[in-house]
Image (cartoon, helix red, strand yellow):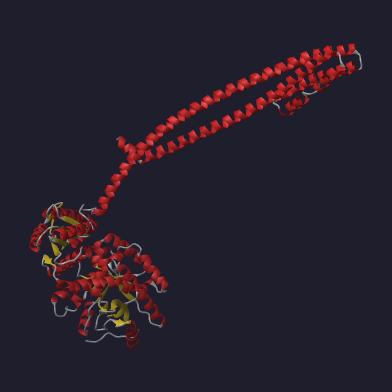
Amino acid sequence: MLSNWIEARTTARTTVISLTIGLAALAGLALWTSLSMQRAAIHLHELNEISDRWGRVVQNVDVADHALVDYLRSGTPVMGQPVANAAGAAGESLRWLREHGANADVRAAVIVGDLYGDYTTLLRETVAAGDSGDGTAARQKADQAELTLVSLRKQLSTVVQLKRLETTDYLRAAERQNGRLRLAAVVAFVIDLGLVALCGVVLLGHRRKILRQAAKSEHEAMHDALTGLANRTLLTQRTGQAIERSNRSGEPLGLFLIDLNRFKPINDTLGHAFGDRLLQHVANRLTGAVRDVDTVARLGGDEFAVLLPSVRTAANALIVADRVHRALEEAVDIDGLSVDVGCSIGVAMYPTDSSDAHELLKHADIAMYAAKRARLGTSVYEPGLDQHGEAQLTVISDLRRAIDHGELVLHYQPKADLRSGTVCGAEVLCRWQHPRLGLLGPDRFIPAAEETGLIEPLTRYVLDHALAQCREWHAGGRDVPISVNVGAQCLHDPTFPDQVSRLLKEHDRPAEALTLEITESAIIADPHRAGDVLERLRELGVRLSIDDFGTGYSSIAYLRTMPVHEMKIDRSFTTNMRSDSSSAAITRSLLGLAHNLELEVVAEGVEDEETWSALAALGCDIVQGYCLSKPLPADEFAVWLRDRRLDELTAPTP
C-alpha cells in the first residue's frame, strides 16, 4: 500500500510542488533577511551620522564655553579671539540636522538652534564689551551667556540621551526581527530537508517503477500480446543466436512455419473473440508439443513458427513436425463448441537449406505454402519449390512500384440491358503490364495485394483512372456508368466513402455513374463495420452490387439488411445453366430472391445467345460476358461503343 502511494503520480507531483514551494520560501527568507540587514545597516548609519552631528554640536558648545572661561580669567583682549571663533561653529551641524534629520531631530534642532543663536549672540557681545574696555558689561554678558549655556546643555543632553535610547531600541528590534527570520529559516530548512528526503524516496520508487515498466515493455516488444509467445523480433534474434551456436558446434537447426488451415472461416463465422481464444489454445498445444529449448513464436494472424536448435537431422525435425501436426489436428473445445483447425507446416534446415536467418525463414515459408497447396500437412524445403515462391515474392515486391509508376492498365467489359440490348455500363477490370513478366491477369496480383495491404492503394488507383476515363467518355458524348470491384479492407476503412466522394468531385462525375462491386466474404468478415461504410456510400448516391453471389458464405441474412442495389450471379452458375440442372435451379432461385428483395440482377459469364435467351425467360435484368464483348482497353472500348450505336441496340435473337 505504501509503495503504491510512493509510486503514485499524484504523490510525485505533490512532493515536487511542495519542495519547489519550500525552496522558494527558503530563498525568500534568505532574500528578506538580506534586505532586512541592509535596511538595518542603512538606518544605523543614519542614526550614527545624526548622533555624530549632535556630538559635534555638544563639542562646539563645550569649546565655546572653555574659550569664554579662559577669556574672563585672562582679561586680555587677545583671548577674545578664540571666543569669537568658537561662536557659531555649531551652526552648520544644526542646519544639517534640520535638513536631513528625522522629525524629532528637526524639532530638536530648531529649539537648540534658537538657544544656540542666543548663546552665540551673547558670546560676541561679551567679546565686543571686553574689546571696548567695559569690563562690567562684559561680565554681565558673560553671566547671561552662562545662563543660556545651562539651558542649551540641558536641551543637548536630553537630545543625546534620546538618540542613544532610539539607537538601543532599534538595535533590539532589529535583533528580534533577525531572530524570527533565523527561526523561520531553520523551520523552512528542516521542512525542505524532509521534502528532499521524500523526493529521494519518491524518485527511487519511480525508478523501480520505470525499471519494471522497461522490463514489461521489453517483454511486450519481444512477445505476442495475445498468446504470450515470442514474436517475430524475438524469433529473429534467437534464430541468429542459434545459427552462431550451430556454426561453432556443427549441429544443424530447424525452423517450422505453421499456418492454420481453417482459422479464417472459423474466425469470420464465430467472431474475433472466439478466434482469439482459439489462437491461445493453439499456442498452448504448440508449446506442449515441442522441447523446452525450442522457441515457439506467433508471427501474426494464424501464422506460427517453431525454432529447433540442435535438432541434428531433418528426420528428427520431421518427428517434431508430426507431433505438432497431430496436436493441432485434435478438435478444440471452447464454450461447448468443438472446432477442427488443422495446419500446414513448412520445414527448413540450417545449414543444409539456408545460409542465414532471413533465408531460413523464407525457405520455411515457401515449404509451408507448398504444403498448403498440395494439402500435404508437412513439407520440407527443396530447391525446386523456389520457382513459384520467388515469382510470387517478386510480384509482391514489384506491386507497390507498379502502382506508383502507373504500370496497371484498365480494361472495360460492357454490360447490357437484357430486354433492350442497350449497353448500360461497363465493369472495370485491372491488368498489370509487368516490365518482365508481360501482361498479368488479376489472379496473379490481386491475392498478393490483399495479403500485403496494397489492395487499398490499388483500389484508389483503379477508381481514379476509371473515373477519369468515364469523364473522357462523357466529354465525347457517351455516358457509360462504370463498375469497380472493392476489396474487404476498403469496406472496413471508415475513410473510404470520403475518398470516393473526393474522386467523384475531382473528376466531375455524378455518384450514380459509379457502381462498387463487393464480395460476400467482405461483408461477413465484419458486417457491422462494412454495413456502416456501405450505408455512407449509399447516402453518397453510389450504387452497390454484391459480386459472385452464391459462391461464398451463406449471407442471405446480411443481404436482407445491407443497403445494396444489385446482385451479380457468378459465372459458374450461368455458364452451366443449360447443361446442369443444379446450376439452372440455383440461378432461378437467386433471381427470385433478388427480385423479392427489389434488387437488380446482373448475370456474369453470358457466352452465347442461348444463355442470353434463357436468362431473359427467367426475368434477368442485365447481362455481361463474351456474348457482348471481351474486356477491352479504353480506346478499343470506345470504338466498340461507336460501332454498336449505344442508344439503339436490340437483344440478339436465338
Q: Quadrant of residue 574?
A: bottom left
Q: Is residue 349 above or below residue 135?
A: below
Identity of the residue drawn at 50% across and 27% down: 182
Locate residue 80 relative to residue 450 in the image: left or right. right
- 13 or 151, which lies in front? 151
Is residue 179 visible in this depiction of the protein? yes
- 466 or 439, which lies in front? 439
Identity of the residue drawn at 73% across and 18% down: 156
Locate residue 437 relative to residue 122 in the image: left or right. left
Total residue callouts: 0
Quarter holding the N terminus is top left
Locate residue 591 relative to residue 62 in the image: left or right. left
Q: Quadrant of residue 118?
A: top right
- 136 or 417, which lies in front? 136
Q: Find the residue positioned furthest to the bottom.
A: 643
Q: Quadrant of residue 90?
A: top right
Q: Is residue 46 above or below residue 643?
A: above
Is residue 599 visible in this depiction of the protein? no
Give the percent coordinates (x, y) of residue 43: 63, 28
Give the percent coordinates (x, y) of residue 600: 28, 73
Give the percent coordinates (x, y) of residue 578: 16, 80
Give the percent coordinates (x, y) of residue 106: 73, 24
Q: Is residue 240 above or below residue 35?
A: below
Quarter holding the C terminus is bottom left
